[in-house]
Each structure stands twice: as structure tokens, then as C-alpha cells.
Image: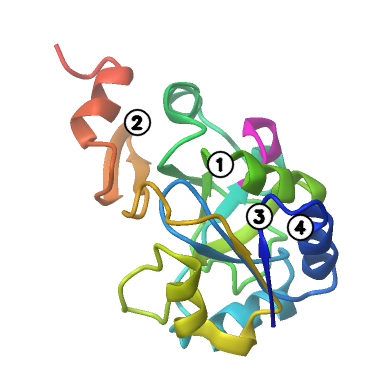
Amino acid sequence: MRILPVNAPEAIAEAARLLRAGELVVLPTDTVYGVAAAIDAAAIDRIFIAKQRPPERAIPVLLADADAAALVTREFPEAARRLAAAFWPGPLTIAVPRLEHLPHNLTQLPTVGVRVPDHSATRAVLAAAGGALAVTSANRSDEPPACTVRDAIDALGDRVALYLDGGPCRGGVPSTVVTFEDGEPRVLRPGPISERALRAVLGLIP
């Protein structure tokens, strides 16, 4: 286990190297700290073990930018594009149809949740690691999210190869998660962005 300031000269390259090797890395984001793995079945299994997370729970994907959605999504509907344009980078996870070949332990659903975080250093890690990573909150399953690197260390310990310390996360609340049913947005997890704000962007509020 190693801890580095997220702005250390070697931090981004070292995080990307470990992720490509199948290790776990904890990253700061604009919401809470996340534990990241390559989009690879064996690496994702490490997340489930570290978090003691039930295997049926899907893991979201963080993206370096909106174009990286093509790495994991089969389709990015117009409504999703409008929400991404309005709220990315930011605390909105959008569930859209996934590519068929994604690891089964990433998601057992026909969709995958994707988000571009509003944290430049973490986006740099994402870009250096290929553009997309499996990332979920850096806590034990069903416990409070980690808002500092110490919270994450206390929860996950030496199951993680590298912790990047970016100070307290400014958001402190996990992202809003939205999906679509018959073209209508449906919030799966409330968060910083309200359903009303989503509907307003989509022109669904008079």
C-alpha cells in the first residue's frame, strides 16, 4: 500500500501503471473517493473483495471525457447526450445500453452507468489508463462513503495498491444516477442533481 498526493509528479503515471497491471487505486473525485480498477474481470473481482460488495451489484464506469463513452456503451441516446452536455464533467451518472463484451461482473444489467468526474487529476489518470475505469465508492459496502483518503484507507486498507490523496472531496455526496424509460428520465439514486433539473434540460418541464 502506498499513498501519494494526487499532484505529485509521478502520481498519474504510477496510478495508470498499477491499474494496467490489474491493481486497485483509490482516487479523489468531485463527489467522494472512489476505488478504481481496469475494466477486466479479474481486476473488478478485487473491488468486490475489497469492499465486501454483493456480486450482483453493478459497478459504474468513470470516463476521461464524453467521447470515451464509446469504450463501454452500445448506444448513447440523444437524451443522454443532452444531459451529458449540461452536467459533465459533474456529479451525474447516466445508465445507457452497454457493449455486449463487457465483463459480466461489471454489470449484469443491459445498461452501464457512465460519468465524467469534475476532477482534473482524476480525469488525467483515466486518460492515462485508457479512458475508462470501473470505479465505485471507496468504502465497505453499505457503509458511509469516504470523503477523505484516511476514510478510504480505514475502509479498504492494504487491499488497495495506491491511494491518491486529493484532500477532502468537495461534494461529499455520491452522484445522481439516472436511466431512461420510454424516453423519460428516471432517477435511480438521488444525488446533487435533482430530477427537476434533469427534466428541465430535456424540455420536459413547461
Q: Nearer the viewer, mark 2 or mark 3?
A: 3
User: Would residue 87 be found to the left or right of residue 103 on screen?
Assistant: left
Q: Nearer the viewer, mark 2 or mark 4?
A: 4
Tell me which label, 2 or 1, sits earlier in the chain: 1
The percent position of residue 5, horizontal first and vertical second, equals: 65, 59
Mark 3 closeness class: few <14, some 14–19, many ≥20 residues within 10 Å: many
The percent position of residue 109, horizontal first and vertical second, equals: 49, 62
| Quadrant housing residue 70 | top right
Q: Which residue is mark 2?
A: 183
Pick the front one: 1 or 21:
1
Q: Which residues are magenta?
A: 63-68
In terms of secondary structure, where does tag 3 sit? loop
In terms of secondary structure, where does tag 2 sit? loop
The percent position of residue 4, horizontal first and vertical second, equals: 69, 65
Tell me which label, 4 or 1, sits earlier in the chain: 4
Q: Which residue is mark 1?
A: 119
Q: Which residue is mark 4?
A: 11
The amino acid pointed to by label 2 is Gly
User: Would residue 135 be found to the left or right of residue 131 on screen?
Assistant: left
- Residue 161 magenta: no
The amino acid pointed to by label 1 is His
Q: Which residue is mark 3?
A: 6
Tell me which label, 2 or 3, sits earlier in the chain: 3
Q: Quadrant of the N terminus?
A: bottom right
Q: Are marks 4 and 3 in contact (CB under 8 Å)?
A: yes
